[in-house]
Amino acid sequence: MKILFSTSELAPWVKTGGLGDVAGALPAALRALGHDVRVLVPAYPALLQAFPGAAEIARPHWLGGLLPTPGLREATAPDGTPLLLLDYRPYFDRTGNPYLGPEGRDWLDNHLRFGLLSRVAAWIGSEASTLDWVPDVIHCNDWQSALAPAYLAYGAERPVKSLVTVHNLAFQGIFDHAALFELGLPDAAWSMHGVEYHGYLSFLKAGLQHADAINTVSPGYAREIQTDAEGMGMAGLLRHRAADLSGILNGIDTRDWDPAHDGHLVKRYGSRRLEDKAANKAALQAEMGLDVRADRPLLAVVSRLTEQKGLDLFLEVAARVLDLPAQIAVLGSGAHALEHGWTAFARRHPGRCAVRIGFDEGFAHRIEAGADIFVMPSRFEPCGLNQMYSLRYGTPPVVRATGGLADTVVDATDEKRGNGFVFGPATAAALFAALQRAAVAWRDPTLWRRLQKHGMARDSSWAESAGHYAALYEKIAG
Ligand code: ADP
């Protein structure tokens, strides 16, 4: 199969969350199965720097509306995946986050920036394309490329198929009606059966409406988003498309995230050398300015600090958690209130709680290795990667029973498979009860080793999930 994988993030160069990780790993896993996968991604500064020799191979023009004429540059990722870099400097030559300006607000021209990404994905599948490569399926990821199926529906002459993967339904790419013209979409697209969503234009809704198939990143999330409570306004449409909607659990990059070969750690370890994890704990405590003590469980978070992640609930019970006794380490950035709340809390509890605001890949690895317990009390979680990293690093997670967390973490009460702690209601009290259970279990070495080993033995690689994607492409392409 020939697959065009369209994405607005690509690890390790440009990443704000799970989408970046998926885009950095899934195409290579599909290529290992023999599929011809090419990745279309905006040529952000980090990518132009990483691939200075990327030559221009096409200039798609007459894209419609106010869309400019970009260049398409070709490069090859170190893992062999061909990259198509969408080069239009006025849109993408901006430092920092791909979506937000310096004040933390969305760039005002995001509809054009990602409209261009979607439009060029459709162009590559269209008869206008000057490339000598035609995909069978365009695989769109999140709202940023979800307009491609609409462009195919309203303009393409060729029967190129499309798949939209929802990594997070909360981000829907919603813009004013004026965007319709600016994006070069016809008036006919403005209907509830097209791109219109309650008087606005929604990229994601357009994709959910027009794609040949839809999937989300876990089976649990695929079920949840069809309910009015968790469908974020799209439940009706998703139920309508239920026959074309499935869930495929994300994998993780098992080379990047492997405690036995992780260059970020002071001491590497595996499930047969778990005692070497202790050196990582001591190093992490020292690095973060926590008291260096082996006799306290160290609970940790690596996350976007947003309401979705439930870290307000954790903050609410943090003082009681310290009194268990335990220590807390947090790495994250996001909402000002949470950044401020956690920073202030850490200042009041020196040596026992430490908070680092920022995004730091190496530090994330050291936390996964150095912590005893990983905390993920998400209100909703399409898949979640950190709990899979923590399982692999012998750091049992405490998670809320939602989406991909419920699909990957088995509560300790299950003696044969238990690998963490799962709680139900999104309340501070339920979270605290689970954290308390974890802290008690940590003091029982036999039980704890069992949980760690179950987690470390879990196969979180992409191999199986890549097979599911390949089967889905084949089904769509008929
Ligand atoms: P989401 O995509 O909703 O943010 P995921 O758990 O799917 O959540 O993926 C988050 C990814 O981003 C993980 O690879 C995680 O390690 C990483 N990450 C999140 N915050 C930080 C941070 N502050 N520093 C380093 N990595 C982070």
Image (cartoon, grey):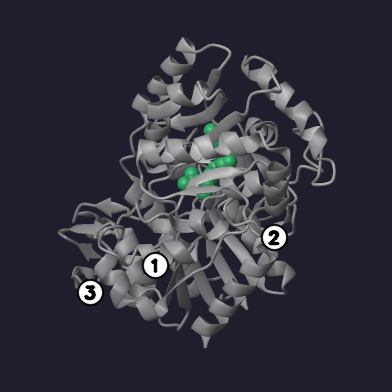
Position of the N terminus by quadrant: bottom right
- Nearest to the observer: residue 53 or residue 165: 165
Residue 54 x %, y %: 66, 51
Residue 459: give its label.
Answer: 2
Residue 179 x %, y %: 24, 55
Q: CA distance from mark 2 to mark 1?
A: 23 Å
Q: Residue at 30% of width from left, 40% of height from top? A: 108
Q: Quadrant of residue 299?
A: top right
Residue 193: give its label.
Answer: 3
- Contact between marks 2 and 1 (CB within 8 A): the answer is no
Q: CA distance from mark 3 to mark 1?
A: 23 Å
Instruction: For residue 375, say whether it is visible.
Output: yes
Q: CA distance from mark 3 to mark 2?
A: 41 Å
Which one is in front in this view, the residue at disc 3 or the one at disc 2? 2
Question: Viewed as shown, does residue 252 lie left or right of 162?
Answer: right
Q: Quadrant of residue 178?
A: bottom left
Q: Residue at 50% of width from left, 61% of height from top? A: 217
